[in-house]
Structure formats: structure tokens, C-alpha cells
Amino acid sequence: MYTLAIDLGGTKLSAALIGEKHDITQRRELPTPASASPQSLEYALAELTGHYQGKAHRVAVASTGIIANGVLTALNPDNLGGLNHFPLQACLEKLTGLPCLVLNDAQAAAWAEYCLLSDRFRHVTFITVSTGVGGGSVIAGRLLTGPHHFAGHIGHIQADPHGPICGCGRTGCVEAIASGRAIAAGAKHDLRGKDARAIFARAEQGHLQARQLIARSAEAIAQLSASLKALLDTECIVLGGSIGLAPGYREQVEELLTRLPPAFHLPVYPARYRHDAGLMGAALWCEYCAT
């Protein structure tokens, strides 16, 4: 049985076929439409899924945002390019003619990484640092989703009461300080207008402001990790996303954690599925729910 796995992110749409041996094949990518028109997303999904007609038996989706009853909404609409309140499950079932399961992307990634670590840990928390900041937790082998499907939106935990306004409307959220969008927004002088990728490149060259912006992001993630240890008694953190997997970033977070009191110490691992964590997690969750 093949699962058509789809990962809907703030900047790109990914899809692949995942077989019973959990092999990933026929991967394709498209940019996420920046238009606020629902038709633009439906058109992109039609283009993406059209390549897999007749090749899959079901569809599993990992999507940014809040997924409730198959509908995509967003706490921070900026991360969806204005797309909001989109009937994602119904749209994909219509396009493919297949049963479809939809899950938040960070929750999906948390499940994927937990499946790899379950022989060592029963309490695992995944943090993605990318366009935004999100996460997911598996506690005692159970994925936390919550009655309103809100569990894991840890990027909207407050990090600095005097910090910048977040897209969700609160002040000083982790996402407003640590995300790629936030790193770029904080750039001044010769870094103004550069994206996070360019700022990381300048940091590697020793640029002081670039290094400070990245260090501020890593500090927010380290403090978030410590708070999650206090709240959930999680046994480890798995770090993913384009920022979280950038060279040297995880090591900064781990080193900052060692400066805290011992009760807050915990290991920080890189996401082993890396940028496929959402795709694989959606497929594994679909498989789990089918049993």
C-alpha cells in the first residue's frame, strides 16, 4: 500500500509516495501560493497531486497551521501567505478520490521522530524553527493534539514581554524572536533586507550583527526547551526546520541549556528525518490510525 504524503509549509508544498517499508519515492515540490485566494492553493494542490494519480491508496497531509475537522486555519496568518480557513481535507479528497488524513506538520514531525526514538524515550518533544516556530510532543507514547487541535503551537509561548509584536497578536512570542522571518525582520544597517539564509552566511563569515541575531534566536529556543522540560518533563528535544538544522545552531541551543540549573538540562538531537519529517510523520500517523 502506498501513501501519498503531502507537506504544506509556509514557503513550499512537498509530496512523495511512501511505501510499506517507509521508503520515500517520487518526491516533488512547488512554492506555496502567496495569494490569499483559496483557488490558488487548490490549483497548486491539483498540479502537485496530478502526478500521482493511480499510484496511491490514501493521502496523508502534514500542514502548517491549526487543523480542525480537516479545515486549515492559522494563528499567525502571515505564515500562510494570507491563506486561511481552507477546507484542506475535502479539497484533497475531491482532487484525488482517496481518503485523506490531515495533521499539523510539527505534530506529524514529532510523531516521526518519536517512532525513531521510542526504544529509548517515551517522552519526546519536537521543535521546528523555520519560517515560524512550532512543535509537537509525544507523552507516554501518545501524540498530544488537544481538544481544539492547538497542542504544539509552542512558538506562541511568550519569550520577552517587551519583545516585538507577533503575527498572532501577542507580544514577544518565541516565533517573533527565533523564526527565520524574525531573524530577517531584526536585521539592521548592511543586513537590512536580507533573508535568514543570507544572515546565516554572513554569520559564518564572522559578521557581528548576524551572529547576534542567530544567538538571540538560539537563546529563545533554549529557554523554550527548558520551559517544556518544566511543563511536560520531556526527556529530549528534537530540533528541525531550516533554521533548527542550520550548521552550528543546535549546538548553540544545547550549550545555552547547559548554563541553566541542572533540572532543566536535556539532550537536543537533530531531526533524523530532516526536511522529510512532516511527510514521513503524516504517513506514519495515517498508518498508526489505521491499525
Image (tube, rainbow, N blue to C red):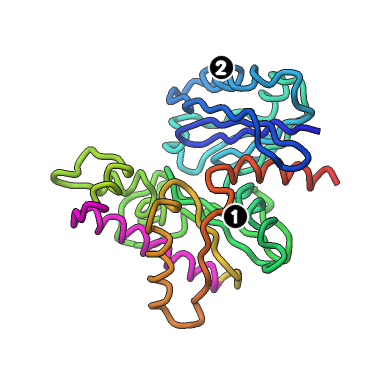
Residue 26: x, y in percent? 63, 28
Crowding at mark 1 (Cα within 10 Å: few <14, some 14-19, many 20+): many
SS assignment for the magenta stretch, majority: helix
Quadrant in the picture for the N terminus: top right
Q: Which of marks 2 and 1 is nearer the N terminus?
A: 2
Residue sitting at x 80%, y 45%: 289
Secondary element at image label 2: helix
Bounds of the magenta segment: 203-230
| Lateral position of residue 58 relative to residue 77, left or right | right
- Decide whether residue 228 is among the magenta residues: yes
**Residue extending furthest bottom?**
262
Residue sitting at x 61%, y 18%: 46
Q: What residue type is labelled 2?
A: Tyr
Q: What residue type is labelled 1?
A: Gly
Residue 253's tag is: none
Pick the residue in front: 96 or 153.
96
The residue where tag 1 is placed is 136
The residue where tag 2 is placed is 43
Secondary element at image label 1: strand
